[in-house]
Each structure stands twice: as structure tokens, then as C-alpha cells.
Amino acid sequence: MSFAQIIPTSTPAPASAPTDYFIIGDTKYISPSAPSSWGDVVIQALAYVALAYLAGWVADRILRWVAAQLANSPIAQATISAVGKALPLILPAYTLLHLIKVNKFHLADIDWLNFAVTSGLFLCSIAHSAAIFFLVAIPIAWAQKVASQSDNKLDDILVPMFSTVVRISVILIGAFKAISIIDPQSSNAILGLLAGSVVGLAFASQDTIKNVFGSVMLIIDQPFTLGDVINIGSHEGKVESLGLRSTTIVMLDGQKLAIPNGDLATRPIVNITRRDFIRAQDIIHLEANTPAGKVGEAVAIIRDLLNDHEGLQPSHPPLVHVTEFTDWAVNVRLMYWYHPATNTKQMEFNQQLLLRVAERLQQAGIRLAVQGTPQGN
């Protein structure tokens, strides 16, 4: 049996199959011509495709080596590596299309031309999708570089999310494109089915969609970043993680609270970490029978201690005033703004300030009142 005898003499095409292709023109106007040997044609085609794959494989290995030398340039590294990964797929696919074009007269002789062109375009579509899938690494590398230069840790979360969404989109679009090449009518039916499914899922998953969009808004607006201490209503804690569904904060008592992103995106958020200063205030209670002169002296002592205090900025001078006379005390309120907003440093300063106030008042003979203690004349 000769090799030509195993080639089918007819491969019926669907009634709706196209006849006009950009690569070879309209198949209706191609005159069939039998080759001298189908065996030579097939062997030659396999050899060219294998050679194209080998060339792509070698180029991939060379480009990977070059990319490894560019560790300090992640964008260039990602570009070269992505191109290398795409070549072993792109070169054989386009080689196959070229072979179909060269042998179009022979394929038309056995009514395989439409089938061959459709198959070639299908494989090229898959190769294109795979190449784009690899090339997505280039904008992702750029986004990672931008995120690494940002102080906001939410950018580090946004990049993987962006990468996942883009790659899934490439796979879905590539699959739809490949199916549309084989059977355009089926692709339209699939598109309609997907549209209906999306609408149904949208109604069934309103809360989930709300939370996903909430996470996107939080990442875009960036009211906080990972590690920030925030206050949300009656809850205060450190942001531990931000996911697609919820944000987790560690409360001051160690408990972890997960808040749905859809709710969090619409609620007032107080970012304690990002404040420029800490406003602190205390009330010094002097005995109710303290003479007016001594009250004025106490105010002067406290003002002196706060003059040019640690963490002072001229735009926020300290305030010291008598605010109230009660049946048991004369209240003197002190208020100051501490820069920067570091809790531990401010608490240490506040402790030293109050101790010095108590010491100076004692030296001046001014006594502090104790709440509930009756005052004599």
C-alpha cells in the first residue's frame, strides 16, 4: 500500500464553513493539483514544523540565559523571558500556516484545504493566546516595580489580583476565539450562554460582587495600608490582611475581626497611624480653696513646662487654662500636640510631664485635690 492511499480522498466540511481565508484567498478559485508524492509532502511538512519548534526552543533557552543576567532590571528580564517562552509556540504555528499556503493546490485535490486552513488558524489562535499569556508578565513586572517603590502595602496585594484577572481573561478570550474559528455558530451560542450565566450569577451573588467591588475601591482609594491602626465605629485595631471578600483587623485585645469589604468601603474610617500628630490633654485638679494667686502661679508653672516641649511644632502651640471651679477642685486643663504621632514616645513624654508638674506644684506649695475629699477653709 502506498503512502498516498492512506490519505482520505474527501473530508466534508460543514455547510457554513467559510471559503475565503486571508492566508490563501478564496478556496473556490484554487485549482486542485496532486503532488508527485504525498509521503514527501508530509515528511517535509513535519520536518519544517519540527525545525521551527527546535529553533524556538533554542531561542527560548538563549533568551532565558540572557534574562537571568538582568536580575537588576525586572521589566527587561520579564520581556526577554516572555518572548522566549512564546517562540516555541508561535514559530511552529506560523510555519504550519506557511506550509498550508505552499501546498494549497495539493490539499485542494483531496478536499482537505478548508479543514487544513481551519486547523492551522485554530492552532495559531491557541499560540497567540499562549504568547499573550506569557507577555502579560511584562506589565505585571512594571506594576510590581511601581508597587515596590510605594509605601502603601496594598499595592503588593493589587498586583497579584491584577495578574490573576488579566490571565484568566486571556484564557477565556483565547478559548472563545479558538472555538469561533472552528464553528462560528457554536461560539455565538456559547457567548449567549455565558451572558445569561453572568446575569444569573450577578443576581445570585450580589453580596459577593459588592464585596469584590468594595475591595477594589479600598485598593484604589487606599484609606489604609497593611499594618495601619484604624478605627471603624466601635472597633479599633491593626489591619492584618485585605482579601477579595473581607478585611481582617487585629483588635487591641488580640481578637481578629473580619469586616466585609462592601460594608467597609461605605463606612467612615479613621486612620490612626497616618495622623500627623497626637493631641493630648489632661486636667490638673487643684484644691478648691487654692488662692487665686496660687492658681495663676500653677498655670504659669504648667505653661513653663510646656514651653518648647518635646515634639512641639510652632503651628500647634500648647494651651493651659483654668476651665472650671467645682465644690472640690479648681480644674486647670492642659492641651498639647505631639509630633510625630508615635504613641510610645508620646506616652513616655506625657508621664514625665505630669511628674514634673506634680513636683513643681509641690515645691510652690500648691496642693492637688483628690476627688470626693471635702475642702476646709
Image (cartoon, helix red, strand yellow):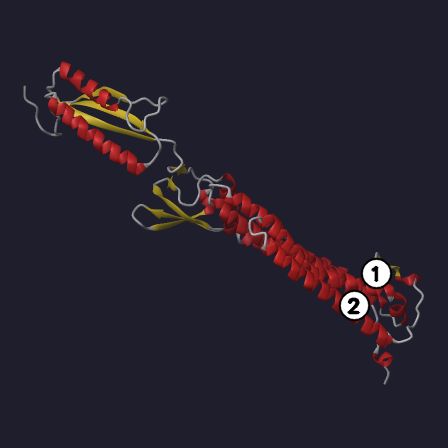
Residue under label 2: 48
SS of the residue under disc 2: helix
Image spot of residue 74 (x, y percent): 57, 50
Q: Nearer the viewer, residue 226 or 250?
A: 226
State the residue at coordinates (54%, 47%). 144
State the residue at coordinates (12%, 26%). 369
Report whether 130 appears left or right of 262: right
SS of the residue under disc 1: loop
Based on the displayed image, in which of its 4 quarters is residue 37 positioned? bottom right
- As drawn, which residue projects farthest toward the left? 377
In which quadrant will I find the C terminus?
top left
What is the number of the mark on residue 327?
A: none
**Residues packed near mark 2 inside 10 Å, few (<14), some (14 to 19) or many (20 plus):** some
Q: Nearer the viewer, residue 240 or 74?
A: 74
**Residues packed near mark 1 inside 10 Å, few (<14), some (14 to 19) or many (20 plus):** some
- Amino acid type shown at disc 2: Tyr
Determine whether 353 is above or below 37 in the image.
above
Determine whether 351 is above or below 2 in the image.
above
Residue 185 visible, this angle? no
State the residue at coordinates (20%, 18%). 300
Based on the displayed image, in which of its 4 quarters is residue 356 positioned? top left
Image spot of residue 51 (x, y percent): 75, 67
In which quadrant will I find the N terminus?
bottom right
Residue under label 1: 18
